[in-house]
Image (cartoon, rainbow, N blue to C red):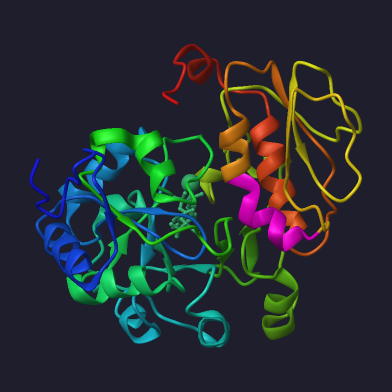
Amino acid sequence: MADDGRKRTDGTGVVVATPESIARAARRLREGELVAFPTETVYGLGADATDEDAVAAVYAAKGRPASNPLIIHVADLDATRELAPFDERAEALATAFWPGPLTLILPRAARCAIAGRACAGRDTVAVRVPDNHVALALIRVAGRPVAGPSANLSGRPSPTTARHVYESLGDAVPTILDGGSCAVGIESTILDLTGDEPLLLRPGGASVEAVEELIGPVGRPQGAGEATPTSPGRAESHYAPNLPVRLGATHADPDEALLAFGPVVPGGAAKTLNLSTAGDVVEAAVNLFDMLLRLDTPEFRRIAVMPVPETGMGRAVNDRLRRAAAPRPASRLAAAPCR
Ligand code: TXA
Ligand code: MG
């Protein structure tokens, strides 16, 4: 097959990100096609955020409920001002953290051009400026805000390589820009600034302590599992591999795969991958989804995971692991998601 810049000869849609392939991808994005792209956190499944049909295609490709809104990626703070009014807190945070792994939930501006579907019909909008040159080039060349959830089937581990995107979404994505492995490896921190009290909807790549230094205390949403209407993606089971997950493992059974952490690792597992032999939580975040996906094969009965300290980035890692281990909805168990 000739390389038309969309399908590589292997038929996966993965193309190495170059100025030329980014320009082609940007043109296709403007024409309403989906483009998967790297960010510093995880790969995103991009669509022109102003195009209702393109946004609908994102939900369809992921199997995502239409009630779960998308993050809008923009190239810089000025582009965001057209979408949402920035109060002092938002201004301070955006200036300090962008480009970077912090998503702000803000009220939608009256003249906001974002498709209603991308915000799931809400009067709020989630925005961030990604810290990745391929993502920024794609947004700038397309000249559009890019709606981009993580580029995986809904409920499954997030992709940190172009290959992961193809393995999760297959031919539903005609163009997957390959920008290598994601530097942070875990999704953005999500902060809701629509009320008087800022609320942490998802721990992630940006430090909550650093956020609190700038704007004061940040609240946590009420309710077990935070499956609140405020952020529908907070449903308890998420990031789940096909295999069951056992947390807090201090030993491993012979039919288990072990996701280890730190220098001292129990023997006996069928296979072991170590999130960080040095015991570094930042390195653990980088490796988390890739290692979960690599251990998720039918030759094992279960994935056992060693404890990860609840400090710094460890909080975001543990949040993902708890959701990966949470009871799965019956619908998802029955529907054996593609591998
Ligand atoms: O790092 C990231 O955030 C990655 C990269 C691609 O940017 N994106 C990502 O998107 O993780 P997604 O769709 O997998 O997760 C976005 C979360 C969902 O839990 C969604 O419910 C929440 O953001 N969200 C989006 N818009 C919202 C809004 N207006 N109000 C409350 N929550 C919102
Ligand atoms: Mg996601």
* Residue at the image position 16 percent from the left and 47 percent from the top: 53
Identify the image quadrant of the C terminus.
top left
* Residue 184 drawn at (x, y percent): 58, 63
Q: Is residue 279 above or below residue 78?
A: above
- 144 horizontally vs 154: left or right: left
* Residue at the image position 21 percent from the left and 70 percent from the top: 144
Please say whether residue 58 is one of the residues in the magenta stretch: no
Front position in the image: 333 or 113: 333
Name the image quarter holding residue 80. bottom left
* Residue at the image position 75 percent from the left and 22 percent from the top: 270
- 46 horizontally vs 25: left or right: right
* Residue 189 drawn at (x, y percent): 59, 63
Identify the image quadrant of the N terminus.
top left
* Residue 59 drawn at (x, y percent): 31, 40
Q: Is residue 318 above or below residue 79?
A: above
Please indicate, yes or no, whether residue 64 appears anywhere in the rendered image.
no
Which residue lies most toward the top here? Answer: 334
| Residues rendered magenta in the picture | 280-289
Q: Main secondary structure of the magenta part?
A: helix
- 264 horizontally vs 179: left or right: right
Please say whether residue 284 is one of the residues in the magenta stretch: yes
Front position in the image: 60 or 288: 288
Front position in the image: 132 or 113: 132
